[in-house]
Amino acid sequence: MLKTLVLTVGVMGCWAAVAFGQATDTPFQVHDATNLDLGDAQITITNSGAFSTVTFPNQNGQLCANVYGFSGATGLLMSCCSCLVVPNALRTLSVWQNLLLDSPRVLHPPAALTVKLVASAPTGNPLVCNAATVGTGPNVLVPGPLAWMTEPEPSGVFASPPAVVKTQFAPSTLSAAELFGTTAQCAALHPGPHACPSCP
């Protein structure tokens, strides 16, 4: 009996470690946006509230979803923008509108992008988001974002419209060099705060 109890507790402890070790609302997440020649892709972002310290009715924990779109062929940053997301709210961004048509670098839009999402704390009053200064001053990385990509996929049937699939962004490791390089490229494109066109 005691042996069974010890084994059960041990298994539950391992399960809890795995469950908490796989949190997906981490500050840095990555996804591909493919088949953009077939149609638009959409990014859906919410805020889990992991950054909140004050509860209902005036919950805090707003975060900046800083979005960066890199050419799938060259790795060059094509566009960057930010979106303020309050806890439990949703923001939906068109990849074409927010990362391709909004880019000063796009002459021939790529068929694929690497999309990176970095969550940071908004600054100032009123709150401001700036994708070019993430990681500096009070614009620190924070937990809480959850994101999904909805994108077209070839149907495999001639003359049929593409299928649509939705998958979650992958939590990733952000190095200091990657953050510096990303924000430096973003600052070259947009020196000041630049809101995603789809965000209020």
Image: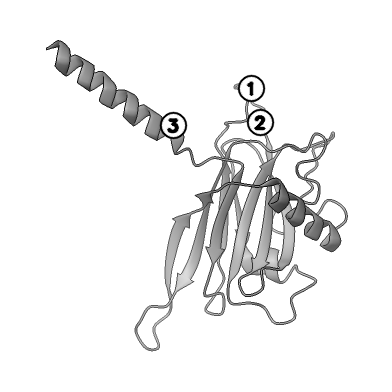
Q: Residue at x 16, y 15 (%)?
A: 3
Give the left or right position of residue 117, taking residue 103 as reference: left
The answer to which image quadrant residue 50 occupies is top right
Q: Residue at x 79, y 37 (%)?
A: 127
Number of marks in picture: 3
Marking on residue 185: none
Q: Amino acid at mark 2?
A: Gly
**Separation (CA) of disc 2 from disc 1:** 7 Å
Q: Secondary structure at mark 2?
A: loop
Give the left or right position of residue 130, taking residue 117 as reference: right
Q: Residue at x 34, y 84 (%)?
A: 157
| Discs 3/1, front | 3
Give the left or right position of residue 165, taking residue 193 as reference: left
Classify 45 as above or below 102: above
Classify 68 as above or below 147: below
Give the residue pinned by disc 1: 53
Q: Nearer the viewer, residue 184 or 145?
A: 184
Across and down, in percent, residue 190 comes to 84, 59
Q: Secondary structure at mark 1?
A: loop
Give the residue pinned by disc 3: 20
Q: Is residue 185 visible?
A: yes
Residue most extreme to the top: 2
Classify 152 as above or below 171: below
Across and down, in percent, residue 23 comes to 48, 38
Q: Earlier in the sequence, mark 2 or mark 3?
A: 3
Q: Earlier in the sequence, mark 3 or mark 1?
A: 3
Q: Amino acid at mark 1?
A: Thr
Crowding at dot 2, Cα within 10 Å, few <14 / some 14-19 / many 20+, comes out as: many
The answer to which image quadrant residue 15 occupies is top left
Give the residue pinned by disc 2: 61
Q: Earlier in the sequence, mark 2 or mark 1?
A: 1
Q: Amino acid at mark 3?
A: Phe
